Image (tube, rainbow, N blue to C red):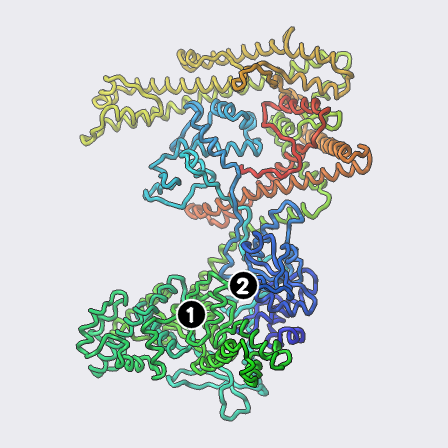
Amino acid sequence: MREAAKRTIGQRPYDVQLIGGTILHQGRIAEMRTGEGKTLVATLPLYLNALTGRGVHLVTVNDYLARRDARWMGAIYNFLGLTVGILQMAAVTENGKKAFLYDPEREHTREDQSQMRMVDRVEAYAADITYGTNAEFGFDYLRDNMTMRLEDRVQRGHHYAIVDEVDNVLIDEARTPLIISGPASGDVEWYGKMAALVRQLKAEDYEVNEKDRSVTMTEIGTAHVEQLLGQPLRDPDRPEDVTPEQAHLLGFLEQSLRAQHLFKRNKDYLVQGGKVVIVDEFTGRLMPGRRWSDGLHQAVEAKEGVKVEPENVTYATITLQNYFRMYKKLAGMTGTALTEAEEFDKIYKLAVLPIPTNLEYQAFGPDAPLTEVKAKDEEGYEYTYFARREDAEKNIVFWRRKDFPDAIYRTVEAKLRAIVREIVREHVRGRPMLVGTTSVESSERLSNRLRAEPVRRLMQVLLIRHAWMEANDRVEDGRIIPDLQQFSQPLDGLRPEDMRPMAKELGLSLNPEDPANLARLREILRLEEADEARLKSALQGGVSHQVLNARKHTEESMVIAGAGAFGAVTIATNMAGRGVDIKLGGDLADEITSAVNRVLRKAGVRDPYDLTDAERRLALQKVDPAQYSIYEAEVRHFFQHFEDMARVRELGGLYVIGSERHEARRIDNQLRGRAARQGDPGASRFYLSLEDDLMRIFGGEQVKNVMERFSIDEDYPLQARMVSNMIEGSQHRVEGANFDVRKHTLEYDDVLNAQRMRIYSQRNRVFEKEDLFEDVDELLRAEVSRRAQEAVETEEPWRLLAWLDQIQPPIQAGDEVFPSFTYQLLLDELGETKSDLAPALRDLAARALEAEHGRFLTWALEQLDHADEAIETQTRERTDDLDTFLDGLRDRDETDTRRPQEIADELASLLRIPLRLTPDQSRLLLDDPQALNEPLREAISAALNAVTISRLAAAIEFRFGEPLGLNPAELQQPGWDEASAQIDERIRAALEERRERLLGADGQIVRDLDAALERVSGEDDQAKLRLLMQMAQGSRAYFDAKTHRQMRQVFTRLHYTYFAAELLKNEAADSLEGRVLGHLQQAQEAQRRAWQEAESARLNIPAGSPEAGESGRRIQNQIYRQALLGAITELWVDYLTRVEGLRVAIGLEAYAQRDPLVQYKSQASEMFQNLLTEIRSAVISRIFLYRPRISAAQEETAGSGRRAEQAAGPAPAADQPQASGKKRKRHRH
């Protein structure tokens, strides 16, 4: 590597760089100072680990550094036969689908595309070495775990990574979650449909509970909605078993009901500018930008008729902390990591090793060529430099950075003045400066102070102060001067007329550009006479400067590289431009270097591209100026660059000023480390105030009291080691506190991270395993076992049968139909019946109808009991409310001026019944409210009876499917007990009428069965199955209001489920499980045969050939893969929403004296187990629904099979479309 680097980029790694590379290869963190060549160091372990062929990653903090370092070091890798991939942001890579490969031969006029060839993203990861930002690596990982095809994945594992600026990535941004989000559903129009539907509902369709803030649909309401939608919402017997589509609609319906009946305009929200704005229920303030969750906000938008904005949900998320812990070997490099060594060790198991600088290494040991020398400057500050060991005079060869003591002021205003004064002084001298701030706001505030007007105002104050000191024969001793206190206010509020009296008294002009004032300012700022022109320019136009806020990485990296130019002033947040070295004299543009190389080559210099800038300068000095030709300007610029570099070195190099201490010491060190790179001269100083956040929170008040007690002037800096130690101690405590917070938060993250790894590992298994039959069989066994056990324990096997008929309806395989489990039970019951088939079928139909009627009667009687209990409960609650209200009226004071009608309206609202009072009763509300107690109780009872009977009658008729002749108005007259008896009697009569109509001597089923027996040929199971299907189906005429024509409607007149369930009574769970499992395994075979025959027809090959058989198995395996991936992906997205809600709410557990973390782990674990159960159930519910497209000849038989699905179930279910292998829509439920 050393030789390759020397031959390609002209840089040979030093010994300390080899040490750094070794540490990185060992999977540790190397702390290397700024300018020590970390970019080159990284190539050593990257090359070594890339030889394994498993891919290695170099992680940077922004796109500019990724492409700069990849192209810069790419020459080395290319020379050694390795390929380099470069990841860039989605905006330039077709939304993350593309990336780049390093291509040294590709030239481009744009910097961000030169030597980079765009390729598919997977090719960038297939390269030996891949450069990119932490976010791009993380998002690619998430996208890979959302794909539905293996070929769409781009990453190939996490073998080895080096993280550049590792403290920034793994600590500062470690908790930053990478989130891929999107609309919860594409069906936004359903909110509008549901809002219109809800407005059509009647009062008896729903119940509103304002105390619980809930709206519940009644049986009749559900029936009404199903009628309006034209599809069922759920099976009333199995409300827990809803299809994803039904759950989808129920979610829309629930939120639309809440929006319509619980959330009121101008109370809970306002409509402004076409948007719904939430009103805080406690403060009454508007909360623009806030939105209700779970689709409620969209429902309110639809209610108000404004544009419905889709709800966003999280599809995938991971923190950088958890992402980088996946690497088998992780390393990092930075200039500041030692102060966070404990966190790196405990969180990432990474040790931090500081690497000496190259100069320190050369000065180490008795035989070292360099030696360190300590000295003091003219102001008495101690500094260190390097000299030749053999040099007796110890002349300076290289410098160490001068770190001046902190300058501490009482107020922020005094601090800002001191900083601006120092900036003006050094800028006028020509010394480059980098001013670090802790926030964008601080940067902008300081930038404003460098404008011409504030600078002139500050110089005026300095002139007055200096002149007053001379006139009063005083020297700066730190004590407050009362006469000058008026000038300590903020410069923004200081006007020239405020200063003019004092200036006149001192015989001073307020024009800073006055010659006498310029001379005085040179003395104040300790400037030379040669600096006067630049001083005057600063007074006239302010201090020219750049402001960087770590936002536009490409532009700012280029600006920060030029921050070392002569007279440059750069204001930046502490992290801006990180990873870019600041060279004294500024960075030399590539076009200048190229022009100089052309001049040298024309002058006969061999390979000028291999020379260093210093060698180019020596060679250029020997060239006749006449040969500069058209490049004369570039050559002059080249020479000027070296002159500026020399001048900057003479002035002391880069001067770094910190305007405030950061909470973390390493960030302060990062700022200081900008100066004195590679032995260049440089210095740093922090300017602080006792009003800074860190000082104010941690002990600054004590120091402030001392300064006030001793009357220390605001403009006088305190430079006490004790205060600096106190600040560093405060930083240490804050670092520890932040570490504890991050560690505690990580404990929460670890819960979801472990679950994420398990889910993603299952997705990987689905992708990578060729044969999924064993996995699906395992899921099938587990799900059947659970369902069978529940069926036996609850003594309700019909629920199991209904579920089986839902997930596995009859399957058309060629000319045969494979029955559902219910039909198979019926076929087994018929047995070998041949000659007496007709009586056996009639008997079976009679028993099935009897079981169905028995179940219906049981349900109806339960509804009567529930209604009775509900009337009793609601009557008691509302009479209690009535008593309280009437007592309040009796005790009301004289200030209550409400009219009787207003009181009656309030009472009606409280009791939630229509209330009609006569004039005499209205007066009694004021005069003697207790006299109305009994009449109002009777009104409550009558109203509740009326509503309950109306809802119950409608619900029973809807469930029965036919009119029962129940007249709610007539039933309300005799009272509840008599009404319930009449309903019971009418139900039993209707059941008997239905039995006679279907199975009487001339019943519909009897007639249809006789006709069907004449058409059926043979008496095998297929013939019996068709007869069973036909018995269950009936048809009736109806008038279509849209077409104004009479139509025939096919409906289910006979349900077999309850009768079939009786055949399973007293069967043990193990036996039942075995029967069901065996049937479903046969269904899998039938499904495979169906696909086999479909493929044989499509490919025109024999159905029994091995090729057709293999095609059927292959398609079935693809079905399993798609079902598994679809279920995992959809339900994991829903789970992320739920677990985030748990995390937000879990803090309330502390009020119950329970540890929130313990409760979070427990509840999240339980939720995750439920998720796995839901995934298993979803997979099993889908795999039997995929069907090949069938021919027209098979359509008739298949149609009978589809209609038979409803006959086998207890009630109509949602239509199941034929699955064709296409991606299913994700539904939230």
Could you tell me if residue 213 is visible in this image?
no
Q: Secondary structure at mark 2?
A: helix
Tell which of 159 and 1149 is nearer to you: 159
Give the percent coordinates (x, y) of residue 491: 27, 67
- Image: 900 above or below 334: above
Labelled disc at residue 1222: none
Foreground residue, 1097 or 297?
A: 1097
Pointer 2: what residue? 64
The amino acid sitting under disc 2 is: Tyr
Residue 492 vertical position relative to residue 1199 in the rendered view, above or below: below
Secondary element under disc 1, as helix, strand or loop, is strand
Residue in the picture at 41% in, 21% down: 871
Q: Is residue 826 left or right of residue 402?
A: right
Q: Is residue 470 left or right of residue 286?
A: left
Dot 2 or dot 1: first in sequence order is 2
**Quadrant in which the N terminus is drawn:** bottom right
- The label number, if any, that marks residue 570 in the structure image: 1
Q: Is residue 434 above or below residue 1215?
A: below
Q: Quadrant of residue 1193?
A: top right
Give percent across and percent down for residue 228: 50, 24
Mark 1 neighbour class, 10 Å CA radius: few under 14, some 14 to 19, many 20 or more: many
Q: Amino acid at mark 1?
A: Thr
Q: Is 738 on the left or on the right of 819, as rendered?
A: left
What residue appears at the point 74 percent right and 28 percent down from the top-left corner? Answer: 813
